[in-house]
Image (cartoon, coloured by chain):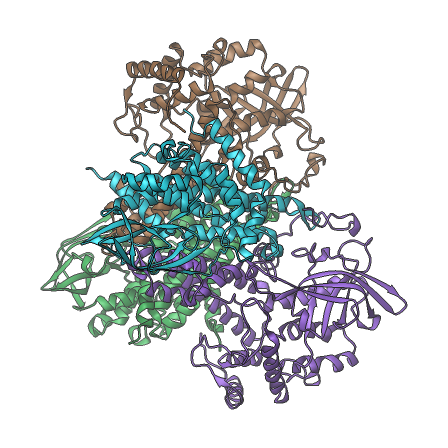
Chain colours: A brown, B purple, C green, D cyan
Amino acid sequence: MDFNDTKDEAKFRDEVNSWLSANADKKEHAKDIYRPAEMSGEGESGESSALKDAKAWQAKKYDAGWACLHWPKDYGGRDATPMERVIWGQEESKFKVPGGFFEIGQGMAGPVLMLYATEEQKKRYLPPMAKGEEIWCQLFSEPGAGSDLAGIKTKAELDGDTWTINGQKVWTSGAHYSDYGIIVTRSDFSAPKHKGLTYFFLDMKSPGVEVRPIKQITGGANFNEVYFTDVKIPDSQRLGEIGDGWKVSLTTLMNERLAVGDASGVDFQEIFELAKDQDFNGDSAISNGAVREKLADWYCEQSGLKYTKMRNISALSQGSTPGPEASITKIVSANKLQDIANYGMDLMDNASIARDEETAIFQGSLLGAPLIRIAGGTDEVLKNIIAEQVLGMPQDIRVDKNVPFNEIPTGSKN
Amino acid sequence: MDFNDTKDEAKFRDEVNSWLSANADKKEHAKDIYRPAEMSGEGESGESSALKDAKAWQAKKYDAGWACLHWPKDYGGRDATPMERVIWGQEESKFKVPGGFFEIGQGMAGPVLMLYATEEQKKRYLPPMAKGEEIWCQLFSEPGAGSDLAGIKTKAELDGDTWTINGQKVWTSGAHYSDYGIIVTRSDFSAPKHKGLTYFFLDMKSPGVEVRPIKQITGGANFNEVYFTDVKIPDSQRLGEIGDGWKVSLTTLMNERLAVGDASGVDFQEIFELAKDQDFNGDSAISNGAVREKLADWYCEQSGLKYTKMRNISALSQGSTPGPEASITKIVSANKLQDIANYGMDLMDNASIARDEETAIFQGSLLGAPLIRIAGGTDEVLKNIIAEQVLGMPQDIRVDKNVPFNEIPTGSKN
Amino acid sequence: MNFNFSEDQLLMKEEVKKLLDKENSVKRNRNVLEGEEKFDKELWNQLVQMGLTATTIPEEYGGIGMGFLELCVIAEELGRGIAPVPFSSSVYLATTAILNSSNEDIKKEFLPKLASGEIIGTFAHSEKTTFPSESGISVAAKSGKITGKKVAVPDGDIANFALVSATSGKNKIGLYLVDLSADGVEIDSLETFDPSRSHADISFKNTPAQELSADAWEDIEKLLDQSAVLFAFEQVGGAEAAMNQAKDYAMGRYAFGRAIASFQAIKHKVADMYISLQLARSNCYYGAWALSNDAPELPTAAATARVSATKAFYECSKENIQTHGGMGATWEFDCHLFYRRARLLSSNIGSQGIWKDKLITSLEKSNSPT
Amino acid sequence: MNFNFSEDQLLMKEEVKKLLDKENSVKRNRNVLEGEEKFDKELWNQLVQMGLTATTIPEEYGGIGMGFLELCVIAEELGRGIAPVPFSSSVYLATTAILNSSNEDIKKEFLPKLASGEIIGTFAHSEKTTFPSESGISVAAKSGKITGKKVAVPDGDIANFALVSATSGKNKIGLYLVDLSADGVEIDSLETFDPSRSHADISFKNTPAQELSADAWEDIEKLLDQSAVLFAFEQVGGAEAAMNQAKDYAMGRYAFGRAIASFQAIKHKVADMYISLQLARSNCYYGAWALSNDAPELPTAAATARVSATKAFYECSKENIQTHGGMGATWEFDCHLFYRRARLLSSNIGSQGIWKDKLITSLEKSNSPT
C-alpha cells in the first residue's frame, strides 16, 4: 500500500520530467491551463490559434519520442509500458501545455487501424496521427441511433471496388478540423441489425462530405452534424470484413469509454471556496450544517473517484488491463458536476443569475453537465454496462435480435 | 378552494359525530390509540383481546347502521355516498376505537362477492362480514409469485361438482383468525399464464388447510403461510368463470391498492420533536442546518401527501372515482418512514442502539419500513403502475404472454 | 368541501392556456432569449388586454376585483408557457405590495395604471449576493430620498417603478416606491442565465422616493410569502410541461427496437417526476387556500409550496433533458428553455436553502407552547 | 506504486475468509442474535488461535508485530461474515489505545494478554445520547478512582477491562484503564437493535482506575480516526456481501418469465450499490495508507472512509432486502442480519452527521493558509 514508484518507474519519471522542464512551463497552481495567444470568444469555436499551438507541441513531443508513447516505434510511438504512459500523463499534466485535438484519433482511430489496417496503411497513417499532423474524427452516432448505436442507417453500397456512402452522422466532435474519419455504415438492410454493418476510414475532404456545427445548450458548438451525399470510399479503406462492422465498432467503443474522464467544471474545491466566502442567512455559509453535509458528500465522491483511479493505475502497474469499471467515473462525476453547480447557484441566490466572474463557472457547469451525462454513454447505458459487464447480470430483453433491420422501428416519431 | 362541507355533508357529519360521541371516547391527542385491555407482548400476535374488542365495536356500529356504510342496505350497509364514507372515516379516526381485522374482508372480499356471487351467497356472507362476525382473508401471493401474481401454481382440479386444491399461499394476513378466504388458483397449466386461473372463496376451517405464521424481521408475525392439501371446494363457491380468475383478481387488486394507506411509524412530528430534544455536536440538533434541511424535506413530503389525499377526497365529493394515482402515497410514505427512522437513529448516535422508550419507535420503524416498501406492490411495481396506468407509457416487454404456463420459468432458483 | 379551483377559475385557466398556446409562448421565450428585446411586448399586451394584470385589483381602482386564486391559475399557465413577460414582478410583487399597503394616495395613483398595463412595476430587494436578512439591507432612505444599490432586480430595466427596501432609521427597514426614470437612478442591464427574463442592477443616488411604510420588514416577509405561492404555481406549470415533454418524447423515440418509454429506467424516471410534481401541486393548492384566505398558516403553507415546487421544476427540467438524450442538450430543442427558467425561478425571491430554513422556523413558531 | 494490499496481506485476507466461511459466520451471527450467548466464544477462540488478536502487537509484547494493513483486511472479512465477536472493541480500540500510549507498565501487563486472547478490552466513551464532544464528558477521575456512567458500551458485558474517558481536572479529559470486575462497577446488559453484538451501560462508583494519560483528548480523537478506518473496512466487507446477495438472488428469481436481474429497475439498483461500494472501498484504501503511515492526512482520510463506508453498507443492506421482495423481510432470510449490522456500525464510534462535520473541519484546517 504505497504511492511510490518502482526503481524503473522513478527513473522513467525523472527522464520525462527533465524533458518537460526543458520544453514547457510548469503550472504554478493545479488549475493553471495553457492559454493560446488568441483566445476564443464565448460561443465561438475559435480553434485556429489553439489548434496551431497544439500541433506544434505534439510535433515537438513526436520528434523527441514522447508522442503516443505506448505505440510501437515503427508507427511513431516509443514501445512504452502502460505504466510509463500513465507516468507521462501524470507529469505532462503538471505543465502548461496545449492539447485537446488528438484524443479521438490517437485513442480510437489509432487502435482500430492497428488491428484492422494493412501494414502499408499503418505506416502511412499512424505516424502523422501520432505527430498531430493529421487529425481524425469518429463518425458513429446518428439522429436515430445514439444509445442504440447499432441502429445506424447511413447506407454503404459497393460497386466494383468503390463504396458509395449516403446518410447523416451527428455528435461528431472535431469534424470541422479533421483530415480523416472512421465511420460505421449499414451495407445490408435486410440482415439482422448487428450483422449488416461495415466499417471504413475516409478522407474528410472527399466530395459530398458536408460538416455543420451543432449549437449546444451552453451556446458553444463542439460537435457537428456530418452529411454524406454520394461520398466515394475505396474498398481498400474498409476495416474488417463486410457485415462485420459491429465487431470493429466494439473495439472502438471500449476505447471511447476508457477515454471519458472526469467532467470538467466546478468540483469540490470550487464549492468549498464559495462556501467559505459566501453568506447564508446572515452567517458564513460554511458554518451552516446543511452546507457542511453537502460538502462532505461531494468530497467523499471526489476522493472516491480519485482513489478508484489510483487503484486502476496500480492494477495497470501490476499488469492488469482496466475494464468497464471505469464507467462509474463518468456517472458520478457528471452528476456531481450538475449538483454542485446548482447548489452553488442556490448559495449565491438571486445574484447567481447574473453572469460575472464568480458565477460564470457555476452557470457554465450547470449548462454543460447535461451533455456530459449523455456523451459517451448516458447514465442509464453505463449502469446497464456495470450491471451486465462488471456484475454479470443478464441483458435487457432484446426485441431487435435476429430480425431484419428494415423491420425494426428506429429513431424518433416526434 | 375550501375545506367546508356542503350543507348535506355537514348534516351527515353532525349525525356521525353525535352517535360516535355517545358510543366512544374522543382522542385527547391525535396520536392516541385504542388499547385493548390485555396488551400484546412484543413479537407475539396477542390478538385475542384486541379481536374481541374489535368485534364488539364492529357489531355495535352494524346494529346502528354504521358498518360498511357505502354497501347496499340489503347486505348490511347504509347505501351511503362515497363522500359520506369518507366523512365517517374522518370522524371515527378522532375516537379511540379498536379496528384492524375487517379491512381485507370488507375492502377486498366484499366487493368481489358483490360482483360475482349469487344473490343467495351475498345475503348469506355479506351481512356477517359487515358486522365483523365472520372474518375473511385473501389467499393470493405464493412463494414463486409475488410482484408477478399471475405466476401462481396452487392447483385446482375439478371432479364432478367439487374442486380439489393443492399448493401453498404466503403473506396471508389474518389467516390464523379468519373464517373464510378468497383464493386464486391455477386450473389449467397448459393454458397461457393469465388464462388458466380460477377464483373461489372457501371455508378456512376446511380439512387440509394448514396455517403457519411467518416471522418478520421486526420479530412480529402478522402474516402466514397457508398450505392446502387436498382441500375440497364446491363449484358453487367459484367466483367468475373457469379460467377467468385473472379478471376477478384484478378487481380485488385494484381495491387492495386503494386500501394501502400511509405507512405507520415515525413521521415528521417524531423527528421534529427528537430534533428539538436532542444534542448534536454540542448544540441543539434543530439549530443545525443539516437537520433543518432534512426536516423541511420530510415536512414537504408529508404535507404533499396530506393534501394529495384531500384533493382525492375532494374529487370524490365531486363525483370522480379515484384512480391508481394513490400509488404515490405508499412509495413516498414507506421510503420517508425508512429515512426518518434511520436519521433519528443517527441523531441519537451510539445510544440509538439500545432499546428504550425513546428509541423503540425509531428501531421498530426502521425494521418495519422494508416490509411496507414491499407489501401491496413494491416501489418498483408501483412506479410501473404510475408510468403505465397514470401516464400511459407502454408496458415492459413481456416474454410470458401467449406461452403455455408450464413452459415459463417461475419462482426462485436459489 | 372543494379542495380545487372553481369551475370559473378552471375556465379562466383554460383561456389563458389557449392564448399562450395560440401565441406559441415557448417560441416567444426563445425569441426573447436569442434576441435583443427585453420582453415580449406583443404577448404582454395580449395578457393585459385579457385583463390579467387587473386580476386582483378592486374595481374601485380600475381592476376586475378577483382574488389570488385566479392569480394562481394564471401563474401556472405562465409557467407552463415559460412566458417571457414581466408578470411576476409587476403583478405578484408590485401590485400585491401596493394592495397590501394602507397608502391610499399611492393606491389611487398606481393601481389603475397597473391594471391597465400602462405601467410596469417591480420589487428591488436583493443586495450583494444573498437574499437579504433584515440586517443585510444597506440601501438607505432619508428625508424622502434613497441611496444605495440593488442587484439582479428582475425586470429592473423594464419596469417604470420599483418598490425598494431600505433602512428608514435605526434597525428599521422601510418600503419605498421609486420612479425609475427619476434623477439619480442608474440601471445596468445584466447578462443572465435565463435571458428570456431581463434583470438589472439598479443604483440610487439621492433618488426621490415615496414611502409606503417606514417599518415594513413584516410587510416584506408577508409579500414574499404571498408571492412564493404564486411563484410555486408558475414552477408547477413549468414542471408539468417538462414532464410531459419527456414522456411524449420517450413514447415516440425508438431504440433497441422499442419505444424508450418501455424501458424501466425511463418509466421510473418519469414516474419520479410525476411524484415530485403531484406533491408540489398538492402543497400549492394548500398554499393557494392560505393565500386567498389570508390564513395564519400562510408562512408555513407558502414555504412548503415553494420548496416542493422548486424541487419539482428543477428535477423535471433536468431529467427531461436526460430523457431526450443528445438532442435534449442542443440549443435547437426547447428542453434548455425550461431548465434555465427552472433555475431562474429557484433564485428569484430567495433560493431553496432560505425557504427550507423559513419553513422550519415557521413550524417552530407554530409548535411553540405559547 | 502499489495502491493495493501486498500479496501476503491478500493471502491473510483469504485465510480469514476461508475460516469464516467454513465456520459459517453468518449462521453464527444468527445463533447469537437469537440465543442467550453474548458472543460466539468458539469462533472468537478460533480467531485468537489464528493469531488475529495479536496482529498489531509487537513481538516484544507477545504479538506477531504486523501492522494496521493486516488489520484492515481482517476487518473487511469480519464485516463480510458479520462475525458475532468483540473484535472491534478489543482490537481496533482497546489494543490500539494501549499501543498508542507511552505507559510501559500497562503495555507490559495488558498487551500479551490481549494478544493471547486471555482478556478482552473495550472503549467506554459515549454518555447520554450523543457521541461526546470534549465538553460532554461527565465521568470524573480523581485520585485514581472514577465515578459516573457510560452508555451503550460495545461488549461492555463481555470485556475484562475498559478504557474510559473521564475528566481529569479543569477542562482536561483523561483516559483510564478500568478492571470491569473491580469494586463499584455496575454493568447492565442492553437489549439492542443488533443483538449479535452485545452492549451494556456501565456505572462506576469510586472505581479504581489506572491512568493512561491525564490529558488525552487528542489521543482519543486519534484513536477514533484510527478505528474509523478499521470500522470502514468492516462496513465495506458487509456492503459487498449484501450487494452480492442481492445480485445472486435476482439472478435466480424469476418473475414475468424472466430473471428479475434482467429488469432495469433491479440492474440499476445493483449498479448503484456497486458504485457506492467502489467509492467507499477506494476511500478505505486511502484511509489504510494514512493509518499505516501515521500520515498527517489521517483525520481527513479516516473521515472520508468512514462516511462513504457507512453510506455504502446502509444502502446495500437496505436495497438488498428490497431486491429480495417479501422473502427479504422475513426473519428466516439473512438479509436483516446485514441491515441490523449496518445500523450498528453506523452508530458505533459516532454516526454519519458527526463524521461529516469532522471531515469538513479537517479540510478547513488543512486548507487554512497557516
Does residue A360 appear in this view?
no
Q: Quadrant of residue B289?
A: bottom left
Left or right: residue A269 compared with residue D71? left
Q: Residue furthest left?
A: C143
- The reply to whether residue B20 is in sight is yes
Residue B392: x and y in percent read 61, 56
Question: Could you tell me which residue is drawn at 44 percent across and 50 percent down?
Answer: D345
Q: In which quarter of the image is the N terminus of chain B?
A: bottom left
Tell me which residue sits at (27%, 71%) in the image: C100
Picture layout, residue B184 above or below residue D264: below
User: x%, y% of residue C351?
Assistant: 33, 55
Q: Does residue C237 appear to the left or right of D205 in the view shown? A: right
Left/right of residue D239 with respect to residue D144 in the rendered view: right
Q: In the image, is residue A359 above or below residue C7?
A: above
For the image, the number of numbered tags is: 0
Please identify the quarter of the rendering in which residue C92 is found. Answer: bottom left
Q: What is the residue that sits farthest to the right in this orientation?
A: B160
Please state the horizontal and vertical placement of residue D339, each as a whole percent of the image.
51, 52
Q: At which x and y percent is residue B347?
A: 37, 58
User: Of residues A259 and B35, which is closer to you in this image?
Assistant: B35
